[in-house]
Image (cartoon, rainbow, N blue to C red):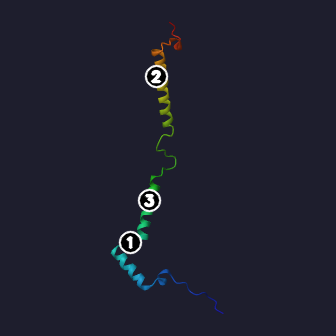
Amino acid sequence: MNAHRNRVRTPEERKHPLVAKREAERKERGVLTQKEIIALKHRALARAKKNSRPKKGEFNADLWEGIYIYLQIYTMYFVIIIVILYFMLDLNYIFFLGG
């Protein structure tokens, strides 16, 4: 009875010698495979996404800025309407001015 397991070959041992030689030559010349090119692009995108994410507690924009702008616009419209009513329609009684 055999008491030990057969040894598992490493990835370098499993690779065909000609393929390993060709890959070593390409690596010397600096030629990248398509898979390596895609991996580099994905890493760059992930790094850019991580760096652009705001830190905890950091706000890049005012969350309420839009509401203040709308309030200013509506207030301006309200004032314009009141002025039109006052001058064009001669409704002095709106302001209790009499006369």
**Who's the residue at 52% across and 46% down the image?**
57
- Judging depth in this view, the residue of 88 and 55 nearest the camera is 88
Above or below, comparing residue 49 to residue 76 in the picture: below
- Which three-letter amino acid code belongs to the residue tagged 2? Ile
> Dot 3, crowdedness within 10 Å: few (<14), some or many (≥20)?
few
Mark 2 or 1, closer to the camera: 2
- Which three-letter amino acid code belongs to the residue tagged 3? Leu
> Dot 2, crowdedness within 10 Å: few (<14), some or many (≥20)?
few
Left or right: 39 as drawn, with respect to 31: right
- Rendering coords of residue 41 (x, y %): 42, 63
Of marks 2 and 1, which one's residue comes earlier in the chain? 1
- Rendering coords of residue 16 (x, y %): 45, 84
- Judging depth in this view, the residue of 1 and 13 nearest the camera is 13
Marks 2 and 1, how far apart at CA = 68 Å
Residue annotated with mark 1: 32
Marks 1 and 3, how far apart at CA = 18 Å
Q: What element carries label 2?
A: helix
Left or right: 14 as drawn, with respect to 28: right
Q: Residue 45 carries which label?
A: 3
Q: What element carries label 3?
A: helix
Above or below, comparing residue 41 to residue 8 in the picture: above
Left or right: 6 as drawn, with respect to 12: right
The reply to whether dot 1 and dot 3 touch (C-beta < 8 Å) is: no
